[in-house]
Each structure stands twice: as structure tokens, then as C-alpha cells.
Image (cartoon, rainbow, N blue to C red):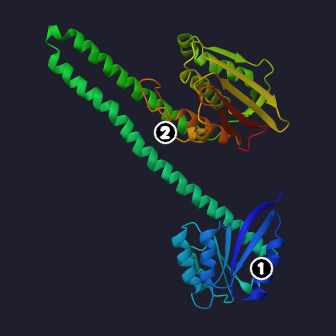
Amino acid sequence: MNKSINVLIIDDDEDGRFAFRRFLTQLSGFEANVIEAETGEDGLDMYRSNSFDVVLLDYSLPGISGIDVLEKLKQLDADAPVIMLTGLGDENVAVEVMKLGAVDYLPKDRVSTDSMHRAVTHAIEQTELKRQVRTQRHELETFANVLAHDLKTPLNGVMGFAELLLLKSEETDEYNNIKQEIRFIYQSAHHMNALISSLQQYANGGLELEAHEFDLQEALDQAKNNLATTIAEHKAVIHIDTNIPRIFGCKSQIIQLFQNLIANGIKYCEATTPEIIIRAGDTGDGTVITVKDNGIGIREDQTKDIFTAFSRLHADQEVYEGTGLGLATCKRIVERHNGRIWCTSQLGHGSTFHVYLPAQVNR
């Protein structure tokens, strides 16, 4: 199936626009939706009001020049995917426009279906890569800020109460208070340890896969065994469909994935007996696994937000302890397997997590 792309041509030459449109309609693997602008001002207005995958920009425009348009496009969108077109086959021009942020450069007299295909493909790939890097940089900054805040909060508690213990250690009549403060130190340290473990799991979700075929039933059983203490404490009941297929992937990460989903179902449950039902089915090109719980549920408009790192819909740590990384880790693992994870839920009526894993992972 061809990929649909939106292309903006900014060129005052009608014959040139016609030729570029013809080349674009002949691109293999793409279905180009083309919008044309005769002037730089019109092109900028169109870019402000639409989303484009590629911009073909003429270097020599009347009025506002192609260079000026390029600079303004970059002010509007730092990742604007601009291919500069010119009648001048001058390397100095190429260097100039690339320094200003164009992703490619084509002399008009050398444009063909092949050269247009290469330039468009390169522009789309480079722009997507830049946006991914920008997103990852933003996530890293958020990660660092939240990490510093969340680690310092319990650490300050540990340090403060440790100082009190030192002051009271020789006062025998303060034994009960000291015991309570020791308990607080333990709880703070426990939270720090849980946060660090979650961060490690989240980071490991992006590691290179060691993929092979294995029995999904074994992975689910292992995830259940890893949570044996939690399951026993909450008297939870875990039902696993007996007709579970074999899948292709990294077994340790798949175990972590379902361990997180099961633990999540137990944690966010107010019923006397948390109940989780796991089913799987072959779709022909992969496997879909569902993890259904009888928990408190999620508002429909929040089902996408729950997979964002450090997103916590229930901020009360005393009721629902957590780090906001469990489901983000699940999403990271599934995407490393070229799969998808999504949630269907209704507030007060439980949630169902759906995981699609393709038949084979591209390593």
C-alpha cells in the first residue's frame, strides 16, 4: 500500500510546478497530495494552516526570496522538510541552503522521477529522525527533572529522620517515637528502591532484542510466579487461557511486560478479590493478548495518557503507590517488538489491556 504524503510546491513558474507535480504522481511507494503556491507569502500561509511531509521550494522567487522563505519556514517549524529547487547548478548555493536547514537540494534541469523519489524519501526520513531525536531529548530532560525531584523527596525524609534518631538515641522514653521514625525511614528507602528498579526496567525496554520463538504460556506462568507474594497478599485470582500460542520475541522482556500488567491490575483494584483474565489468539500475522481486570477503571479520554512516562492518574501515593513508569515500560517493550498496546476501559468497571505482537520481530 502506498504511503500518502502531503507536498507543498512553492514556485512562480507554472510549467515548473506542472512538471514537479507529474514527477510526484509517478513516485513508487507514495501517493502525493500536492498543493501549489506561486509566491513565498502564499506558501508560508499554506504551511501555517496545513501539515506537509515535503516542501519543494524554488530558490529564485519574486518578492520574498527562496532563502527568506526557507528561514521563515524554519522559524515556524524547526523540522520543516524543505527540498530547495534552483535553476542554478551552483555548489555554493547548495552549501548555503543546506546550512540554513534544507534537507536536500535539486537543480531543476536534473529533476527526474528517480531523483525526486530519492530526495522525497530522504526528506521524509531525515525529518522523522530529527523529530524523534527532539522527542527523545525532551523525554530525557523530563526524565532527569522528575528523577531528581522524586529521588530527593524520599531522600530528604531519610536524612531528616536519621538526624532526629541521632539526637534521640540516648533518650529511652522516646523509644516508641524512634520506632515510628525508623518505620518512616524504611518506607522512604523502599520507595526509592522501587523507583530505581522501575527506571532500570524502563531503560532496559529499549535494549537490543535477543529474539527467538518461545511458549507464551511459560512466560505468563513465570510472570505470575514472580508476583506470587503480591498475589497471595491481595488474594488475587489469575486466570490464564489454556490455549496460548507460541510467539517470537525476547522472553525476558515479555515476562516483564505481563508482570507489569498483572501487577497493575492488582494494584488498582478495590474489590475484595482482584481478578485478572488473560487470553490470547492468533491473528494470522501475529498474536493478540488481552489482560482484563476488575479494577477501578480509567476514564475513556485518559486511556492514551497512561502509557506516558511518569504519568500518574492517581497521585495519592498512600493509596496507589507507584512510580508512573510501569505502563510506559510496557509500551516501550511492545514497540521494540514492532507491536502495539492499547487500553479499553470504563471508570468503575475495570480495564482491558490489548497487546498485539507480530509473528516475527525485525531485529
- Quarter of the view holding residue 61: bottom right
| Image point (60%, 13%), residue name | 273
Residue 336 image point, x, y percent = 66, 41
Q: Does the image show residue 103? A: no
**Looking at the picture, does residue 219 appear above or below residue 118?**
above
Query: Which quarter of the rendering shows the C terminus?
Result: top right
Query: Is there a contact, CB below 8 Å, between mark 2 and mark 1?
Result: no
- Quarter of the view holding residue 291: top right
| Image point (24%, 28%), residue name | 160
Q: Is residue 54 left or right of residue 245?
A: left
**Looking at the picture, does residue 153 appear above or below residue 176?**
below
Three-letter code for the amino acid on which mark 2 is drawn: Phe
Q: Does the image show residue 126? A: yes
| Image point (62%, 16%), residue name | 225
Query: Which quarter of the rendering shows the N terminus?
Result: bottom right
**Looking at the picture, does residue 110 appear above or below residue 322?**
below
**Looking at the picture, does residue 47 appear above or below residue 182?**
below
- Residue 74: give its label: none
Residue 19 image point, x, y percent = 80, 82
Three-letter code for the amino acid on which mark 1 is drawn: Phe
Residue 171 image point, x, y percent = 13, 11
- Quarter of the view holding residue 94: bottom right
Q: CA distance from mark 2 to mark 1?
A: 46 Å
| Image point (54%, 37%), residue name | 202
Q: Residues within 10 Å of mark 2 (few under 14, many from 20)?
A: some
Kindly state the secondary structure of the residue where label 2 is placed: loop
Q: Is residue 345 left or right of residue 197?
A: right
Q: Read off the residue under disc 2.
A: 310
Q: Read off the residue under disc 1.
A: 20
Residue 181 image point, x, y percent = 27, 18
Towards the viewer: 180 or 167? 180
